[in-house]
Image (tube, helix red, strand yellow):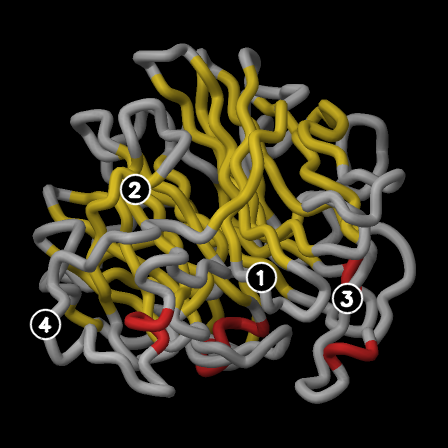
């Protein structure tokens, strides 16, 4: 195994908390993290952008009472009023300044996409070097999760404010690159064919910019049973109409994508709502697949249920090629605003399989 970070471990059930050097940047997963004002960081289901020496952390702003909507009683889902997308900035990944709401919800208009009763989840921001714009993508939905749409917003600055451009179902009128005629044959259960003209369902999602500047959206589609990987337009504001189906019928969500040694890697989860499940991982030589499943990447106490967490993003450490941080949410489904963050280093074994091992505390590389 390639060790990328200074870490702690467990011997005979004893937690080893190694003394960190003075000034070291220490991460303690699953504890309460506060910003420079002493307030608890509120950035759930988020993602990270590194721009001009600064990390920007975007996430769902969750505040207030967690409740059980009438429309969701059938599946036991809990919700909290959508507060918009928060933004924090840091130069060291441990000291975070609250930059405020990069994209607020709309409390005045109940019919707006960003109405507080609606869904604003999994925000991710990418920078377009051609247009010099910061582009935010997120899962936008109705209270009963029936809309299954992607929302897009844009800004001239990384912390916003972002201007909301609207939402849509991706790839209306486009057929997947790897679809067969059988895949497109209409039937009551064929959601791909049903949604071909109007656009495909899009829920849990992420965006990824490749080495050549081409951007892609990964999203759970076909009622969360199959994932799609979709190329974006040159301005990153719309789908380009080129997409493929991956993990067909495997019910993946919470995708987190990164690239290492020329290969594309993914960490994800199953579809069990707020409850944790065994982590998943996969690798591909081409971003459109085929993707080869690698199993649960987690190791150590709690690994069988992803340490009680769900994946949201994998961050390449700036200036440290080959070093990545896997970002997870530890959801508290009965009090969502109190959900915690778990960040752990990514490692690779001799065969190139990615590994994420539990550590009570670890030190970021200098």
Q: Residue at x 54, y 43 (%)?
A: 167
Asked if residue 185 can be seen in this view, the reply is yes
Nearer to us of marks 4 and 3 is 4
Q: Locate the N terminus and report the quarter of the image it occupies.
A: bottom left
Query: Would residue 92 appear left or right of 97 to someone viewing this image?
Result: left
Q: Secondary structure at mark 4?
A: loop
Q: Locate the C terminus and report the quarter of the image it occupies.
A: top left
Q: Tell me which label, 3 or 1, sits earlier in the chain.
A: 3
Q: Tell me which label, 4 or 3, sits earlier in the chain.
A: 3
The span from disc 4 to disc 1 (Cα, nearest Å) is 26 Å
Q: Secondary structure at mark 2?
A: strand
Q: Residue at x 43, y 73 (%)?
A: 224
Residue 115 position, x and y percent, is: 78, 47
The span from disc 4 to disc 2 (Cα, nearest Å) is 22 Å
Q: Which residue is mark 2?
A: 216
Q: Residue at x 68, y 70 (%)?
A: 144
The span from disc 1 to disc 2 (Cα, nearest Å) is 21 Å
Disc 3 to disc 1: CB gap under 8 Å: no
Disc 1 to disc 2: CB gap under 8 Å: no
Asked if residue 17 can be seen in this view, the reply is no
Nearer to us of marks 3 and 1 is 1
Q: Which residue is mark 4?
A: 180
The span from disc 2 to disc 3 (Cα, nearest Å) is 28 Å
Disc marking residue 147? 1
């Amino acid at each position: 195994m390639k060790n990328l970070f200074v870490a702690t471990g467990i011997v005979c059930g004893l937690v080893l908390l190694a003394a960190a050097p003075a000034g070291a940047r220490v991460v303690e997963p699953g504890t309460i993290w506060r910003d420079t004002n002493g307030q608890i960081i509120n950035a759930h289901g988020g993602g990270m952008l590194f721009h001009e020496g600064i990390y920007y952390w975007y996430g769902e702003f969750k505040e207030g009472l967690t409740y059980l909507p009438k429309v969701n009683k059938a599946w036991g889902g809990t919700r909290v009023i959508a507060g918009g997308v928060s933004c924090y900035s840091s130069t060291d990944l441990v000291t975070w300044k609250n930059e405020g709401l990069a994209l607020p919800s709309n409390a005045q208009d109940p019919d707006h996409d960003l109405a507080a009763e609606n869904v604003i989840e999994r925000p991710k921001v990418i920078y377009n070097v051609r247009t010099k714009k910061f582009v935010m993508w997120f899962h936008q939905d109705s209270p009963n999760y029936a809309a299954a749409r992607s929302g897009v917003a844009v800004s001239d600055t990384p912390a916003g404010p972002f201007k909301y451009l609207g939402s849509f179902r991706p790839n209306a009128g486009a057929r997947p690159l790897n679809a067969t005629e059988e895949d497109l044959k209409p039937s009551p259960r064929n959601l791909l064919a049903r949604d071909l003209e109007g656009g495909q369902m899009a829920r849990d999602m992420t965006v990824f910019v490749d080495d050549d500047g081409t951007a892609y959206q990964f999203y759970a589609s076909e009622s969360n049973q199959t994932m799609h990987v979709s190329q974006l337009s040159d301005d990153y504001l719309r789908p380009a109409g080129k997409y493929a189906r991956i993990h067909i019928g495997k019910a993946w969500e919470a995708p987190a994508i990164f690239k290492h040694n020329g290969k594309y890697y993914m960490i994800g989860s199953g579809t069990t709502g707020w409850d944790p499940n065994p982590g998943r991982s996969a690798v591909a030589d081409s971003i459109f697949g085929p993707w080869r499943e690698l199993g649960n990447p987690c190791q150590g106490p709690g690994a069988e249920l992803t340490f009680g967490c769900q994946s949201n993003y994998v961050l390449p450490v700036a200036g440290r090629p080959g070093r990545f941080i896997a970002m997870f949410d530890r959801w508290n489904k009965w009090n969502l605003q109190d959900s915690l963050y778990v960040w752990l280093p990514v490692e690779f074994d001799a065969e190139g399989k990615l590994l994420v091992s539990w550590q009570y505390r670890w030190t970021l590389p200098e």
